[in-house]
Image (spheres, helix red, strand yellow):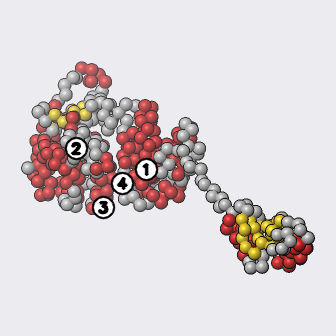
């Protein structure tokens, strides 16, 4: 029954009161859960609520409007609760996803480690979100707060999209809320010029003279040995043989040398001093006694893992004229060795390039360690003599 007006109620009360005075108990509904109850003989009229059945007050003392309000207040509040998500959190799911991906990849692939690096750094604000909470708006808002490169954010969302697609297929989440959308554009790659080896001090080392200790160690090690970026970043202490003065990169290394075969890098004396000094300092700085990586992170949340790529790349972008990048050291080394009459063969071997054809590999079992070591030592002597500012020289004293 719909609500009645005051005029309608007055008309009803005259009729109902007469019936009550004649001895009949009256209980009439007047809409919205409100009742009028009139006592027989006395004709006393009161408002009651239907559910729960409760007296609200006399019809003569409470207005009709207030009576309706009181009924509303007595009605049980219906709370529509959002169904609690049963989806796992990103922190629970992503590492398991990476391990599943690892099974499908070629041994030695760096892809799983790259994913974990994004997870441990760029995706940090998303860790406690459930998979069905990873919407475009939420992911964009959270990642905008992270001090990471546009490229890392783009790659993080790209990885999340792939993970969510797998999660949908596996029935771990109903749908991919990101829907293949990436709110972060992939940055345009900036082409780097490569300076001559005679300009390294002014174009690279001096602009980066006051960066953190770990960055200086990294840049100098790359320069001394001609490492590729991830060869150096993911270098392990167990691969370094100080007694034989060799760095031995296994074929199945995560950083995956391009040939997928073990190779040995003879160390210059400056490299040995640098690594020994850094190992001692690292043990002072890190809470873990024996970190696996030469460049192990000092972030207490990720002890044991390697430092992120952006840690080493960002200072170069921010502080230099961008005329020299990490890979450019390899070109400088090759040019220097040619200019100083070292054989092309040995210079390529120093850079871990095996230029032998299949027949030569079959019959030439020599590793030419010592001749390659002479290349490394000559280059290191030149750097120390002519291209390193004081903060870098101090690392090899």
**Nearer-N-terminus badge (2/3):** 2
Q: Nearer the viewer, mark 3 or mark 1?
A: 1
Distance of label 3 from label 4 (alpha carbons): 15 Å
Direction from residue 243 to residue 80 in the image, left or right: right
Q: Position of residue 15 (x, y in %)?
A: 91, 73
Q: Provide the secondary structure element on which disc 4 rests.
A: loop
**Nearer-N-terminus badge (4/1):** 1
| Circle 3 crowding by C-alpha within 10 Å: few under 14, some 14–19, many from 20 | few
Q: Which mark is residue 127?
A: 1
**Nearer-N-terminus badge (2/1):** 1
Q: Nearer the viewer, mark 4 or mark 2?
A: 2
Residue 126 in view, yes or no: yes
**Residue linked to disc 2:** 288
Assess whether mark 1 and mark 4 are in contact (beta carbons under 8 angstroms). no
Q: Nearer the viewer, residue 5 or 360?
A: 5
- At horizontal 25% and vertical 45% (from top left) the residue drawn is 296
Q: Which mark is residue 191?
A: 4
**Residue 247 higher or lower than 19, as above or below:** above
**Residue 39 higher or lower than 358, as above or below:** below
Total numbered circles:
4
Direction from residue 174 to residue 97 in the image, left or right: left
Q: Nearer the viewer, mark 4 or mark 1?
A: 1
Q: Position of residue 200 (x, y in %)?
A: 20, 55
Direction from residue 132 to residue 15 in the image, left or right: right
Q: Which mark is residue 318?
A: 3
């Amino acid at each position: 029954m719909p609500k009645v007006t005051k005029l309608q109620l007055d008309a009803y009360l005259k009729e109902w009161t007469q019936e009550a005075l004649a001895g009949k108990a009256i209980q009439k509904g007047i809409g919205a859960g409100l009742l009028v109850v009139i006592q027989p003989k006395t004709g006393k009229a009161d408002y009651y609520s239907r559910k729960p059945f409760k007296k609200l007050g006399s019809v003569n003392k409470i207005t009709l409007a207030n009576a309706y309000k009181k009924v509303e207040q007595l009605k049980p509040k219906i709370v529509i609760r959002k169904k609690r998500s049963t989806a796992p959190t990103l922190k629970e799911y992503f590492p398991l996803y990476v391990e599943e991906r690892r099974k499908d990849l070629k041994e030695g692939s760096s892809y799983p480690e790259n994913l974990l690096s994004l997870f441990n750094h760029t995706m940090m604000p998303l860790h406690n979100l459930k998979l069905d909470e990873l919407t475009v708006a939420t992911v964009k808002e959270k990642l905008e707060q992270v001090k990471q490169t546009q490229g890392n954010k783009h790659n993080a969302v790209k990885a999340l999209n792939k993970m969510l697609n797998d999660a949908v297929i596996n029935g771990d989440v109903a749908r991919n809320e990101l829907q293949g959308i990436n709110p972060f554009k992939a940055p345009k790659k900036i082409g780097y010029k490569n300076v001559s080896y005679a300009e390294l001090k002014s174009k690279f080392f001096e602009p980066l003279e006051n960066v953190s200790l770990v960055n200086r160690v990294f840049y100098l090690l790359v320069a001394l040995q001609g490492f590729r970026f991830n060869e150096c970043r993911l270098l392990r202490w167990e691969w370094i043989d100080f007694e034989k003065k060799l760095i031995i990169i296994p074929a199945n290394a995560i950083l995956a040398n391009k040939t997928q075969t073990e190779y040995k890098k003879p160390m210059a004396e400056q490299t040995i001093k640098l690594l020994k000094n850094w190992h001692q300092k690292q043990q002072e700085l890190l809470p873990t006694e024996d970190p696996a990586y030469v460049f192990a992170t000092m972030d207490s949340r990720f002890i044991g893992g390697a430092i992120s790529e952006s840690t080493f790349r960002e200072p170069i972008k921010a502080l230099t004229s961008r005329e020299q990048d990490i890979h450019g050291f390899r070109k400088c080394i090759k040019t220097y060795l040619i200019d100083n009459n070292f054989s092309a063969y040995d210079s390529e071997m120093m850079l871990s390039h095996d230029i032998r054809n299949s027949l030569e590999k079959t019959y030439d079992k020599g590793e030419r360690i010592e001749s390659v070591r002479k290349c490394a030592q000559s280059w290191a002597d030149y750097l120390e003599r002519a291209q390193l500012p004081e903060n870098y020289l101090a690392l090899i004293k």
